[in-house]
Image: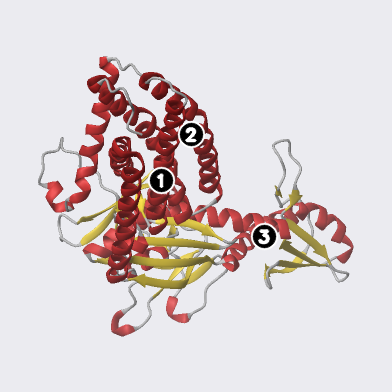
Amino acid sequence: MLYFTRPKLYAIIGTCVVGILLTLPNFFSRGDLAALPGWVPQRQIHLGLDLSGGSYLLLEVDMAAVVKERLEGLVDAVRTKLRKANIGYTGLGVEAQAVNVKLREPAQGAEARELLADLGNRVGGGPLGGGQPDLDVAVGADGTVSLSLSEVGLKERAARAVEQSIEIVRRRIDETGVNEPTIARQGEQRILVQLPGVGDPDRIKRLLGTTAKMTFRLLDANVDAASGRVPPGTELLPSAEGGRGGELQRYPVKKKVEVDGANLTNAQAGQNSQTGEWVVNFQFDSIGGKRFAEVTRANVGRPFAIVLDNKVISAPVIREPILGGRGQISGRFTAQSANDLSVLLRAGALPAPLTVIEERTVGPDLGADSIKAGLISVVVGFVLVIAYMLAVYGLFGIFADVALVLNLILLVAVLSLLQATLTLPGIAGILLTLGMAVDANILINERIREEVRKGKSPYAAMEAGFKRALATILDSNLTTLITMMLLFSFGSGSVKGFAVTVSLGILTSFFTALVLSRLMMVSWLRRTRAAVLPV
């Protein structure tokens, strides 16, 4: 235990040098680092919302829209089922959170119930099946049939909508270049978004407040939009740009979706080579490209509406078949609006609208005060620990202090390498790590003292002290590590940051207390050949 081979010695020194090099970038601005050669380490610790300032948004998924979309999707399925079974009906439509239809023959109610119950899905079951239906089908005595989402169906829809929304929100924010955003579920229908360094969240709110559900549909050439009357299968949709003189321009758009925006694989802002105006170039996957080619080939000369969130962005006339699966959206875009639309299309459509129910902006002054207070607490705690070790253990206390400094450096180096986000709980984790690291050195020194009192030689006392302290150090640190793993698994946001900081600190303290301290103490003993240990 007291012998270090040359490769092991080089590995320990190399680890310390690498840790120092990885820590140094945190003392320079990003502009200064960008001017350095590419081989110089440039990864830094990011400051969290409570340190650097930024924006806090609490979003809520519009469950009414989720339910409405599901029910409207059932209308065509109900119509098809009843027609195939030759069951007459009237008044089919969505009303009061349910699909309602009245049978012409109330006696066919049982048959209709059995048919329509098949439209539901089973949720909450295991891999072997089972579960409960997500639809409730009720039949009244007068032949009125009502389909509504069951309680388990509502919960399943809400959970799925929130999960999908979190993923799409993450994609959209990542596209904007915000460093280390925090995006987490809160409650059953809410999403917490923290954006460090974003002082003006208006653009982010616009991106998140847009559902971005894009469809490509044909215009009904036989309808006069000015009359306001449309046949079944057609609806009047407003233009996204408005009309001339402030009037609302409306288009008669067929309800049938010819190509779904879900088949888009890429979208990029660009400029038209002929007019110089900003456009959005898009590309479909193989299925969407094939369908797009079929539709444009069959409808040359007809207007084709590009609809985003029930608003017509543009309605160009199909001049020729578009066979490459690529297209272009134009419509009075600016550079930023074209960029924003391409971000939305690349990230995908939200399953339901998101509403901002709480918004806070943390100013940089608060962040500066938090950083100052946190740094003061770390420095004061660090100085007190060093003074205590020096006073109680003398030379071996100095060795412990050196190991403690390198433990802090290695911890910052690992956090920099991971480009972790440091928050106030993270600073608290660093303080806790320093205390735990010095505990290991105290245990080792006290064990060595006990062995010296028993009359053992310096070499035997040092070796026995490290061996006897090892089990205690491992036990105490492993129990803390398990606790931190549980915090990381079940916590969120800053709690996870605290758990990560403490866990990494435990791992670095193993190295500094059990390896680095031992190396310094053994090197001193071999050099001086002291007859008495200064402990």
What number is the disc on residue 2? none
What is the C-alpha distance between the residues marked 3 and 2? 51 Å
What is the C-alpha distance between the residues marked 2 and 1? 13 Å
Residue that carries the numbered disc 2 in the rendered image: 473
* Residue 3 point in image, percent of width and height: 33, 16
Type of residue at label 1?
Thr
- Specify how the rendered protein is coloured: secondary structure
* Residue 435 point in image, percent of width and height: 41, 47
What is the C-alpha distance between the residues marked 3 and 1? 45 Å
Residue that carries the numbered disc 1 in the rendered image: 433
Mark nearer the viewer, 2 or 1: 2
- Which comes sooner in the sequence, label 2 or label 1? 1
Q: Are marks 3 and 2 in contact (CB under 8 Å)?
A: no
Q: Label 3 crowding class (10 Å Cα cut-off): few <14, some 14-19, many 20+? A: some
- Which comes sooner in the sequence, label 3 or label 2? 3
Viewer-nearest residue: 88 or 115: 115
What number is the disc on residue 154? 3
Type of residue at label 2?
Ile
Viewer-nearest residue: 201 or 382: 382
Q: Residue at x 49, y 26 (%)?
A: 468
Asked which secondary structure carries label 2, the reply is: helix
- Please identify the quadrant where the C terminus is shown: top left
Asked which secondary structure carries label 3, the reply is: helix
Asked which secondary structure carries label 1, the reply is: helix
